[in-house]
């Protein structure tokens, strides 16, 4: 191993405790993007990143305002002719902490229990950002960077990045690069390095059904007017058949079938039904007939109710027919589904099936297409070699069930591929109470990123 690379690895190992303490300060900022009460905290988190980047001697560090939350941009030139330029993407905003009563410790007081650090944003993804910055610091301790660096850290990812695409479109020349490093994914297990090559798309909707002008006494008016709660339940129930297939018009028209080679790749993954049951706590698995659990997660489209509200839901009883009912529904998409066509099919289904006597409203919160990453790109090869070096085994390649819209945006506007990495684990409770980060994996993640930059 070249001397500078080994020096960087040694620096990371020697300063690990300090890295963790610094990260805790960052994680303690409650940068919840969906809550306007946390606007000041969002700005604090952005300024914290500005200070960290300036501390790493980035020549250009800026805060760019958007219609809601700011974007932190930075760049640093390594001074080597012909060096690659890596654009690092991350988001410093986090999910809300509700339900707060299910947390075993304060969500924004990083708390170590065993090998895990419990804190909102640890895995998704402030901890991943910090691992990347500490890898850069470690490399600089051993000399100059092997690549040029640019950074985008946004504060609206958990909102669906409503302002990011327009901002990127307005700064294409500034963001020119050879590859995007996106450390917003994870590994299948602590000993199973993983490279994500596919991400599902998303159409996230909200429907609201209106009935009577106000809540009614169910004894006096039950059976004579449509109950919006009954109507919305009927509509949702009809969106899938008994085999788990989605019934929206045209939903599967453009779904690409899995090739035998892809199905064999899924079979290689060291993760199966028992793992899913353990992580979910469900009594049994369910899903679209004819596919394995991993295929359903990574390569098949889905439709799920994310929230539903209507009428009286407090303690005790209150017998009413509610005036309205609301549901939030997400559809995860796979190549080559078009979000516009899926949305139109969703609207057509509601119009075709909603009974007379009620009216409904539709709202789309976010949408994006699915994407696949080229496994033969130099960046993926660099990451493969880095993971093999650190974990002593070749990584597995998998499709992720979630969505990272910025990957498609980068492809479309900048014409560059992303390499997707990260060191969160399936049981890290991302988006849930007691989010946590496996610290031994995070520590190795810093070393992996050091190797990645040198390999590239």
Image: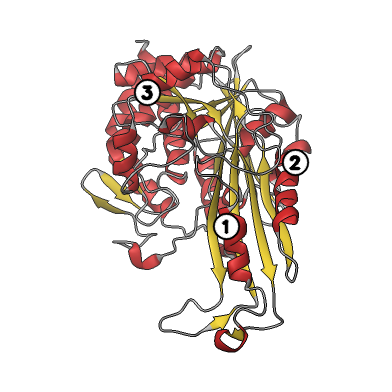
Which mark sits nearer the N-terminus, 1 or 2?
Answer: 1
Question: Do the residues bearing badges 3 and 1 touch, measured as CB atoms within 8 Å?
Answer: no
Specify the label residue 64 is tagged with: none
Residue at disc 2, secondary structure:
helix
Between marks 3 and 1, how big is the CA–CA gap?
Answer: 34 Å
Residue at disc 1, secondary structure:
loop
Few, some or many residues within 10 Å of mark 3 (<14, 14–19, 20+): some
In the rendered view, would you say 206 is above or below 288? below
Residue 18 appears in the rendering = no
**Left or right of 396: which side holds 175?**
right
In the rendered view, would you say 31 is above or below 180? below
Foreground mark, 1 or 2, reads: 2
Specify the label residue 269 is tagged with: 3
Residue sitting nearer the eye, 28 or 362: 362
**Left or right of 395: which side holds 412?**
right
Foreground mark, 3 or 1, reads: 3
Residue sitting nearer the eye, 90 or 211: 211
Few, some or many residues within 10 Å of mark 1 (<14, 14–19, 20+): many
Residue 125 appears in the rendering = yes
Mark 1, residue position: 33
Question: Do the residues bearing badges 2 and 3 touch, measured as CB atoms within 8 Å?
Answer: no
Which mark sits nearer the N-terminus, 3 or 1?
Answer: 1
Residue ID at (55%, 12%): 376
Mark 2, residue position: 340
Residue ID at (57%, 14%): 377
């Amino acid at each position: 191993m070249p001397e500078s690379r080994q020096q960087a690895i040694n620096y990371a190992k020697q300063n690990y405790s300090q890295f963790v303490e610094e990260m805790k300060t960052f994680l303690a900022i409650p940068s919840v993007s969906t809550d306007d009460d946390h606007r000041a905290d969002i700005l604090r988190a952005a300024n914290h990143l500005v200070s960290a980047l300036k501390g790493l001697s980035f020549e250009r560090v800026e805060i760019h305002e958007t219609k809601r939350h700011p974007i932190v941009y930075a760049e640093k030139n390594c001074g080597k002719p012909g060096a690659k330029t890596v654009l690092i993407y991350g988001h410093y905003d986090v999910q809300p902490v509700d339900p707060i009563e299910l947390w075993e410790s304060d969500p924004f007081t990083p708390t170590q229990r065993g090998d895990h650090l419990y804190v909102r944003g640890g895995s998704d993804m402030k901890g991943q950002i910090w691992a990347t910055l500490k890898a850069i610091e470690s490399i600089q301790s051993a000399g100059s960077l092997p690549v040029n660096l640019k950074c985008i850290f946004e504060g609206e990812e958990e909102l669906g990045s409503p302002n990011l695409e327009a901002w990127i479109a307005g700064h294409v020349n500034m963001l020119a690069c050879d590859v995007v490093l996106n450390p917003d994914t994870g590994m299948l297990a602590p000993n199973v390095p993983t490279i994500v090559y596919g991400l599902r798309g998303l159409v996230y909707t909200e429907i609201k059904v209106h009935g009577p002008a106000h809540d009614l006494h169910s004894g006096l008016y039950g059976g004579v007017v449509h109950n919006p709660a009954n109507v919305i339940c009927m509509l949702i129930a009809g969106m899938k058949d008994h085999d788990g297939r989605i019934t929206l018009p045209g939903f599967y028209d453009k779904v690409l079938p899995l090739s035998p080679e892809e199905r064999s790749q899924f079979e290689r993954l060291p993760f199966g039904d028992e793992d899913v049951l353990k992580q979910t706590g469900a009594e049994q698995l369910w899903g679209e007939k004819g596919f394995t659990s991993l295929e359903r997660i990574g390569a098949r489209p889905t439709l799920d109710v994310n929230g539903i509200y209507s009428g009286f839901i407090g303690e005790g009883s209150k017998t009413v027919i509610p005036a309205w009912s609301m549901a939030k529904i997400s559809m995860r998409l796979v190549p080559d589904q078009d979000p516009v066509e899926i949305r139109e099919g969703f609207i057509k289904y509601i119009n075709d099936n909603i009974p007379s006597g009620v009216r409904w409203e539709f709202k789309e919160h976010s949408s994006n297409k699915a994407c696949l990453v080229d496994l033969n790109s130099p960046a993926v090869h660099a990451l493969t070699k880095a993971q093999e070096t650190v974990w002593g085994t070749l990584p597995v390649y998998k499709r992720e069930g979630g969505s990272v819209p910025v990957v498609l945006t980068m492809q479309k506007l900048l014409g560059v591929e992303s390499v997707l990495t990260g060191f969160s684990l399936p049981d890290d409770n991302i988006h849930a109470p007691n989010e946590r980060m496996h610290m031994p994996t995070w520590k190795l993640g810093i070393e992996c990123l050091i190797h990645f930059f040198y390999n590239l």
